Image (cartoon, rainbow, N blue to C red):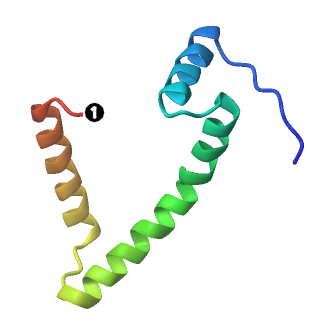
């Protein structure tokens, strides 16, 4: 596997290096693990659809797009109230 150079602010590099060191890893190994474990937006959307289909099959509940928007809005409101995000 060949290496690639990525230019990021020095502060970001130092922070990532400190996080990697705290986990007993080199920055290179930490970034490789991070890249392997994070999902792309397409992968997240696919998993969300799979979860939605499984829940619909399991419970029979299939919210409409309007209901989903309302539920998302309510969740956002509750998270903001709890200081999350």
* Outermost front residue: 24
In the image, 85 versus 60, the foreground residue is 85
Q: Report the side of 23 relative to 85 (left or right).
A: right
Quarter-of-image position of residue 63 = bottom left
> Which image quarter is the C terminus in?
top left
SS type, badge 1: loop
Does residue 66 sit above or below 5 in this rendering? below
**Residue receiving disc 1:** 85
- The image shows residue 54 at horizontal and vertical percentages of 33, 83
- The image shows residue 19 at horizontal and vertical percentages of 49, 26
- The image shows residue 27 at horizontal and vertical percentages of 65, 29
Say if residue 80 shows up in the picture. yes
Q: Report the side of 3 relative to 70 (left or right).
A: right
In the image, 17 versus 59, the foreground residue is 17
Q: Report the side of 67 relative to 46 (left or right).
A: left
* Residue located 54% across and 50% down the image: 38
Does residue 39 sit above or below 28 in this rendering? below
Q: Residues within 10 Å of mark 1 (few under 14, many from 20)?
A: few
* Residue located 82% across and 27% down the image: 5
* Residue located 47% across and 27% down the image: 22
Say if residue 40 shows up in the picture. no
* Residue located 24% across and 80% down the image: 62
């Amino acid at each position: 596997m060949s290496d690639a150079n990525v230019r990021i602010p020095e502060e970001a590099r130092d922070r990532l290096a400190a996080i990697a060191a705290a986990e007993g890893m080199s920055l290179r190994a930490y970034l490789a693990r991070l890249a392997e474990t994070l999902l792309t937006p397409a992968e997240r959307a696919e998993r969300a659809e799979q979860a939605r289909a499984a829940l619909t099959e399991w419970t029979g509940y299939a919210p409409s797009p309007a209901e989903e928007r309302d539920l998302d809005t309510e969740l956002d409101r509750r998270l903001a109230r709890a200081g999350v995000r």
